[in-house]
């Protein structure tokens, strides 16, 4: 069950990667990267359940925060030209 | 088969459906501002359904509390990031897509 769900989410990641590579503007790529990050958290939790390792959940929490902060930091750099 | 496993399977199936619909929407929509719709809303619902299914499968323990924390974090962070992307793109002057008029 968990392995089938993780295969489906991997397929969705591959579809989103098309937009991240081809996207006409920078913001399309940022959006696709954010969506890929969310799906990566889901796949991390699913693999943790499939292998019976609940330690992966802590990594998922950290990855969620890093994904959000990376998106905001990139947008701020893009808008203001600096990060301070 | 256990009833918990069946409920978990149903939630996982609906969540995977939403996640795949998100990916198809990001690929197929014609414009940046219309691509924000699947990325902001459908993705959040899809991951929330998958995490609710895993919480039902696990029962009440430390693991399900961690799953709930991850779910709430993504529920707050993902629409906020989408809104930030939309505002940055709008301030940079990207023109929204319109349907072509027939001449």
Image (cartoon, helix red, strand yellow):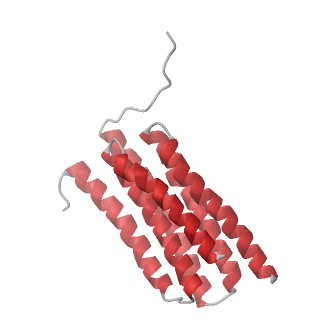
Residue B93 x, y percent position in the rendering: 31, 35
Residue B20 x, y percent position in the rendering: 58, 56
Question: Which residue occupies 51% across, 72% down?
Answer: A43
Compared to residue A84, the image places residue B3 above or below, namely below
Regarding residue B84, the answer to whether it shows in the image is no
Q: Is residue B47 left or right of residue B98?
A: right
Depth check, front residue: B67 or A4? A4
Q: Quadrant of residue A76?
A: bottom left
Depth check, front residue: B56 or B17? B17
Q: Is residue B99 left or right of residue B86?
A: right
Residue B100 x, y percent position in the rendering: 48, 21
Question: Which residue occupies 36% across, 40% down?
Answer: B90
Question: Which residue occupies 52% across, 75% down?
Answer: B70
Compared to residue B52, the image places residue A36 above or below, namely above
Question: Which residue occupies 80% across, 84% down?
Answer: B2
Compared to residue B32, the image places residue B46 above or below, namely below
Residue B84 x, y percent position in the rendering: 39, 52
Identify the image quadrant of the N terminus of chain A: bottom right
Q: Is residue A1 left or right of residue B87?
A: right
Identify the image quadrant of the C terminus of chain A: bottom left
- Counting every numbered tag in the picture gives 0
Regarding residue A5, the answer to whether it shows in the image is yes
- Most extreme residue toward the top is B103
Compared to residue A79, the image places residue B81 above or below, namely below
């Amino acid at each position: 069950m968990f392995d089938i769900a993780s295969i489906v989410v991997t397929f969705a990641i591959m579809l989103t990667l098309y937009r991240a590579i081809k996207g006409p503007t920078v913001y399309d790529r940022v959006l696709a990267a954010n969506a890929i990050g969310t799906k990566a958290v889901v796949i991390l939790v699913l693999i943790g359940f499939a292998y019976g390792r609940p330690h992966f959940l802590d990594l998922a929490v950290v990855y969620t925060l890093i994904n959000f902060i990376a998106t905001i930091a990139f947008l701020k750099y893009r808008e203001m030209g600096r990060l301070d | 088969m256990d009833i918990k496993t069946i409920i978990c399977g149903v939630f996982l199936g609906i969540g995977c459906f939403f996640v795949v619909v998100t990916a198809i929407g990001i690929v197929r929509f014609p414009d940046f501002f219309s691509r924000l719709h699947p990325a902001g809303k459908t993705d959040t619902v899809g991951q929330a359904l998958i995490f609710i299914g895993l919480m039902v499968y696990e029962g009440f323990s430390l693991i399900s509390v961690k799953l709930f924390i991850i779910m709430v974090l993504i529920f707050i962070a993902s629409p906020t990031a989408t809104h930030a992307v939309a505002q940055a793109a709008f301030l940079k002057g990207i023109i929204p897509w319109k349907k072509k008029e027939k001449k």
